[in-house]
Amino acid sequence: MVPYNDNTMKNTIKDSFSSLVADRYLLVLSAVLALLAISFAIYVGLSVHPSELQLVSHCSAFGITHLYRDQWYYLLTFGAFGLFAAALHIILAVKLLMIKGHSLAILFAWLGIAIVILAWMTAYAVINIYVNNGCSI
């Protein structure tokens, strides 16, 4: 059996972090992406209120019921998606910086910002429908 050597994992994380700090533009984009995702999750968390109102979560052309409904806490997954997408985009941008170079990593960080903004717009539209149907305080 081959013994596990955790020095390679530590070295990989240290090299990734030092590469991120050395590239100031990617560092700023990553910070903006993280702050945008955190503020998006806070917005969703503060906008969703418990109620008995069910909302349409997805639709299907198959089966008897075409519209499937979920409870109010389904809306909290929008915030979790924003945090998860931002974390993955930051990690993959740093990995792309190490493997492919600066330009592809920057493109991927901007793509992450665009995805979080699109998720915010979608969540805003859905939450406004939810709030305007009698769920506001």
Image: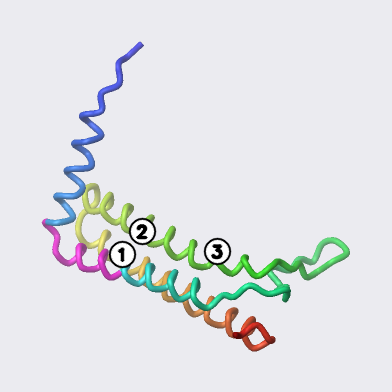
Within-10-Å neighbours for mark 3: few <14, some 14–19, many 20+: some
Q: Amino acid at mark 2?
A: His
Q: Amino acid at mark 3?
A: Thr
Q: Which residues are magenta?
A: 22-32
Q: Which mark is residue 77?
A: 3
Hey, which residue is sitting farthest right in the picture?
Answer: 64
Closer-to-camera residue (37/106) = 37
In primary-sequence order, the first of circles 3 and 1 is 3
Report the residue at 53% width, 76% height from top: 123
Within-10-Å neighbours for mark 2: few <14, some 14–19, many 20+: many
73 lies above or below 133: above
Q: Is residue 106 left or right of residue 56?
A: left
Which of pointers 2 and 3 indicates the residue nearer the eye?
3
Q: Amino acid at mark 1?
A: Ala
Q: Is residue 15 left or right of residue 109?
A: left
Residue wearing tag 2: 89
> Image quadrant of residue 53?
bottom right
Q: Is residue 96 left or right of residue 39?
A: left
